[in-house]
Amino acid sequence: MVFRSGMLALLVGLVLGCGPAPREELTHATRSITDGTQDTGHPEVGRLLIDASGGTAQDTCTGFLIDKQVVLTAAHCLMPTKNNLFQIGGKLYQVIKEIPHGSWDPSTSKYQHDIGLVLLQDPVTTVPSFPPYGTLSPGVAMPITLVGMGKTAESASDSGVKRKAQNSVATVGTGYFTVTGTGSGLGNICYGDSGGPVYGKSGSTEVAVGIISADQSPYCTGTTSYHVSIKDHVGWIQSNTQPDTVGPTVTIDAPKNGAIVGTTVTLQVTATDNVGVTEVEAQVDGASAGKLTKAPYQFALTLTAGGRTLKVVARDAAGNSGSAQVSVTAMEGPAPEAGWPQPDGSPDLGLAGDGIDPNRRPEEGCSMSGGDVTSSGLCGSVGLLLLLLALRRRSCRR
């Protein structure tokens, strides 16, 4: 099932029973539950809004929470270069990372390993608990419940409503299973259901056994649909959802430690994290001076004259943090001009027009308006005095 309308369907071989069946046309299920009913349960199921930066999603899929900040969905629903959101319980949650299964390859199979994870910036606190997943293997004739949030027919415009339908497993392959039929009490998939859960039961406990992946042409008509077996991918899920204990790495790019700056200065920061940076805070002498939630991390600061400590703290969604700080001296007025002394010695300490030759080496003496002074001790003392006078003059001009 392609999650874009009009995407060309791919021909794949169907592995059924003991040998390959004739090649059939499949598309990813950006389609909704057919012959189902509105679902007021399953609070863990939500809607993935793809490329929503303009305020309207360009595509949608279904996904379901397996933890407060982890959504399980289909790999073909992931578009990590876009601004994607997860909608659940009437609220929108920012997606900060997407992880498709490394073995998913749509050029060879639409449904094999079509599984992915979505990590959210903030935890969803409105879902009291999450059903178990991957503890039950799908079996032929197993009763199942399909849940999705797409349309009920190709020409319908009723997506965004959570619906469920009953059916049973038709066949089981390596890492996937199929479902057939719709109508007469049975339901199947249509546009918008990709990534939705397929539930089975272990006793009275509902267990997520599959992820909606693809269906076969003609679409939304109850022909064969394909679903990823979660149990075959539990190890991959767990390896990618271990608790995050690594904090962000932070660097203050400007100003440098020990710099002399004006009372207005731009603090430039680089912050990275193994999962994602959720916030960078600037502090001046321990007091918060602003927060940013996305790069570039640049803070326009107003300082009072004197020695100041500039600190930045970066945080991730797991609550880990990293920090960096520099000490600067703020002088009245705007940022210093080129030639103002800096801790790394560049630009040079010499100030044009102040009587000091910045290119003269100490052994050559000190060139001043009254002639050369060759004594190294006198040269050093007079040079220091002239430098201090130059700094004072420049400060007074401001």
Image: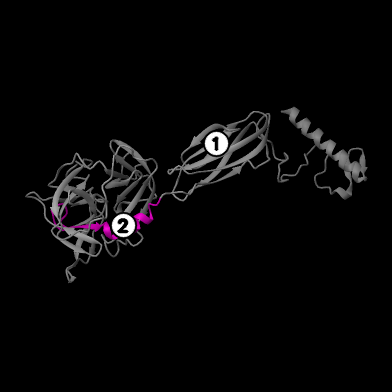
* Colour basis: one colour
First-in-chain label (1 vs 2): 2
Residue name at image x 38 percent, y 54 percent: 240
Q: Quadrant of residue 163?
A: top left
**In the drawing, does residue 377 fall left or right of residue 289?**
right
Please name whichever residue, 273 or 7, is drawn nearer the observer in this view of the structure.
273
Q: Which mark is residue 204?
A: none
Q: Position of residue 334 (x, y in %)?
A: 65, 31
Residue 398 appears in view: yes
Residue name at image x 10 percent, y 51 percent: 186
Q: Quadrant of the N terminus?
A: bottom left
| The stretch drawn in magenta includes residue 234 | yes
Q: Position of residue 68 (x, y in %)?
A: 34, 43
Q: Amino acid at mark 2?
A: Val
Return the residue at label 1.
282
Q: Which residues are magenta?
A: 216-242
Residue 153 appears in view: no
Q: Quadrant of residue 152?
A: top left
Q: Farthest left residue?
A: 184
Q: Amino acid at mark 1?
A: Ala
CA distance separating discs 1 and 2: 40 Å
Residue name at image x 59 percent, y 37 percent: 266
Q: Secondary structure at mark 1?
A: strand
**In the drawing, does residue 257 fall left or right of residue 116?**
right
Return the residue at label 2.
234
Q: Residues within 10 Å of mark 1 (few under 14, many from 20)?
A: many
Q: Position of residue 38 (x, y in %)?
A: 16, 40
Q: Position of residue 303 (x, y in %)?
A: 62, 30
Q: Quadrant of the C terminus?
A: top right
**In the drawing, does residue 384 fall left or right of residue 5?**
right
Q: Farthest bottom residue?
A: 19
